[in-house]
Amino acid sequence: MELIFIFVSIARPVGNIFEIYKQLEERNVIISFKGVMTSEILTTILQIMESRMDKLEERPKIRKKVFNVLVECLQNLYHHIDDDIDDKSTPQNKRNCLFILARENAAYIITTGNYIKPEDSPILEEKLDTINGMTRDELKSYYKQVLNEGTMSDKGTAGLGMIDIARKSGKKLEYDLTPINENLTFFSLSVRIQE
């Protein structure tokens, strides 16, 4: 599954709203968000998803997996937005992020995106490749190791989020690091969840 992105020119927003709507429908998008992730928005998204899962009458096992991965992904967006990215050359708000949850047959796909500093890309890529190269049992051991030995980052985390997402989804983490300019890289993550 490729990362979910919707490309629609909004030069004429009123005329293109239906095009955006059609693309969201075609990709079975349940909920999407673009903006600055706050604790209030995080809580609201979780409440909306709980309600949507009720309406979909999803089985408890898949429901729990989706909710657990969703919490980790949203917390990553909330905690790991770089406040100190210094880039005046682009008009985007560097604290903006993207979140999309879609359904594809029996699977749910959570896609996130946010800006990071280019110098953080190699470290993140190495970490994700290490996680993707592990078996379920190795991930469990690695999680315990990082939990016991991990030092807290300046964001107050020990780096367990991505490990936990891989463990709970049971799938490889699909990601992309897109250089924007010398001060910005856009990090995209896509996670598939199914029974």
Image (cartoon, rainbow, N blue to C red):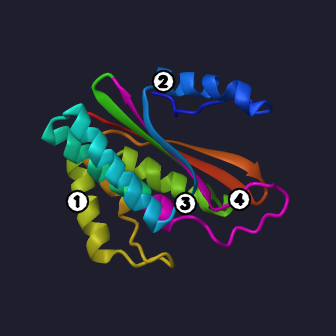
Please give the range of residues in magenta. 75-104
Of the residues under marks 4 and 1, which one precedes in the sequence? 4
Kind of residue sitting beneath label 3:
Ile
Q: Position of residue 174 (x, y in %)?
A: 46, 39
Which residue is drawn at the image coordinates 52% and 60% (left, top)?
Answer: 37
Q: Which mark is residue 25?
A: 2
Res 17 → quadrant: top right
Instruction: Measure how far apart labels 4 and 3 are at the Cα level.
Output: 24 Å
Going by the numbered disc 2, the residue's amino acid type is Glu
For numbered disc 1, what is the local secondary structure? helix
- The extreme left residue here reads 60
Q: Amino acid at mark 1?
A: Ser
Q: Are marks 4 and 3 in contact (CB under 8 Å)?
A: no
* Of the two numbered discs 4 and 1 in the rendering, the one whose residue sits closer to the viewer: 4
Q: How many residues crowd mark 1 within 10 Å: few (<14), some (14–19), many (20+)? A: few
4 or 3: tag closer to the N-terminus: 4
Residue 28 shows in this picture: yes
Regarding mark 3 in the picture, which secondary structure is present there?
A: helix
- Dot in front, 2 or 4: 2
Residue that badge 1 annotates: 141
For label 3, the crowd category at 10 Å Cα-Cα, with few meaning under 14, some 14 to 19 and many 20 or more, is few
Q: Would you place residue 153 above or below residue 161 in this image?
A: below
